[in-house]
Amino acid sequence: MNQSLAPMALLSRRGFPTSLKRKPLGARRSRAASILLALRAARPDSKVELDHGDPFQLLIATILSAQSTDSRVNQVTPGLFRRYPDPAAFADANPAEIEDAIHSTGFFRAKTRAIQASCKMLVARHGGRVPRTLEELIALPGVGRKTANVVLGAGYGIASGIVVDTHMARLARRLGLTRHVDPSKIERDLVDLVPKGEWIFFSIAGVLHGRYICQARRPLCGACLLAPHCPSRDRESKRAAGRPVNDRPNRPPARPRRSRDRS
Ligand code: SF4
């Protein structure tokens, strides 16, 4: 065994590392600080991959990115923003034309409804500008904490929270920074461990690390600079190599069945 690497942590019954939860907050924060340093080394120039020119375009692009990929959205948005340059243009547009323009990003009807309703609210309540507070942003139709944190962090440079999408959720669990699956609970754990001044970087770099290295099915643990701090490294390496993995190592052994035949 490589002595420089941390020993395998205990796993919960759901297969999540449990070691961090058993340590005091200070120890967990210091471990999170090591992860942050490694993330800075791994992804020093992280930036969001959704092309945008201002917070409004980032808001629309983030709504479009749900259940889609950033590259797919980036194919659609240049033409979309030329045609509809501001909230008023989206609000007044024929919905069928927006649907047609964003069709390839999926869920185009629901996204069109969300975009138009949000843009109408931007015009009616915010003078056509994207607000700068989490509360005002999540009041917009189709905008949740994830989208609001993306827009405030990457669009305005305001640290309002930590972006928890599917990539961040997976990474945080594997790193033992949370045991939750609910995004708002994961975010609560993360903002407790990561200093506020690092929330924006951690959000962007963590999402990218989850997307490109700590992938869902085949995490690239051998190429991961966070590996020395990762309690899931051994298990995920095995899984990626197609070897059997016990996701419930702490499960009590099954009781032997009583035989009905007492003779
Ligand atoms: S070591 Fe593997 S499981 Fe851990 S963060 Fe890196 S890629 Fe993910």
Image (tube, rainbow, N blue to C red):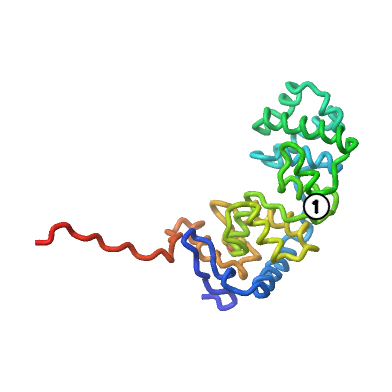
Image vertical order of residue 234 relative to residue 213, above or below: below
Q: Quick check: which quadrant has ligand 1? A: bottom right
Image vertical order of residue 122 relative to residue 155, above or below: above
Q: Tell me what residue is drawn at x 68 percent, y 61 percent.
A: 190
- The residue nearer to you, when weighing 97 against 214, is 97
- The residue nearer to you, when weighing 227 against 202, is 202
Q: Dot 1 lies on which element?
A: helix
**Residue positioned most to the bottom:** 3
Q: Position of residue 17 (x, y in %)?
A: 54, 65
Amino acid bearing label 1: Gly
Q: Tell me what residue is drawn at x 50 percent, y 69 percent.
A: 10
**Residue positioned most to the left:** 263
Residue highlighted by disc 1:
153
- Mark 1 sits near ligand 1, with its Cβ under 8 Å away: no
Q: Position of residue 73 (x, y in %)?
A: 72, 37
**Residue positioned most to the right:** 127
Q: Is residue 23 left or right of residue 128?
A: left
Q: Position of residue 247 (x, y in %)?
A: 46, 59
Q: Position of residue 174 (x, y in %)?
A: 58, 61
Q: Is residue 231 left or right of residue 123?
A: left
Q: Is residue 253 left or right of residue 113?
A: left
Crowding near the residue tagged with mark 1, few <14, some 14–19, many ≥20 C-alpha atoms within 10 Å: many
Count of numbered circles on the image: 1
The quarter of the image holding the C terminus is bottom left
- The residue nearer to you, when weighing 8 against 198, is 198
Q: Is residue 215 left or right of residue 47?
A: left
Image vertical order of residue 146 relative to residue 189, above or below: above
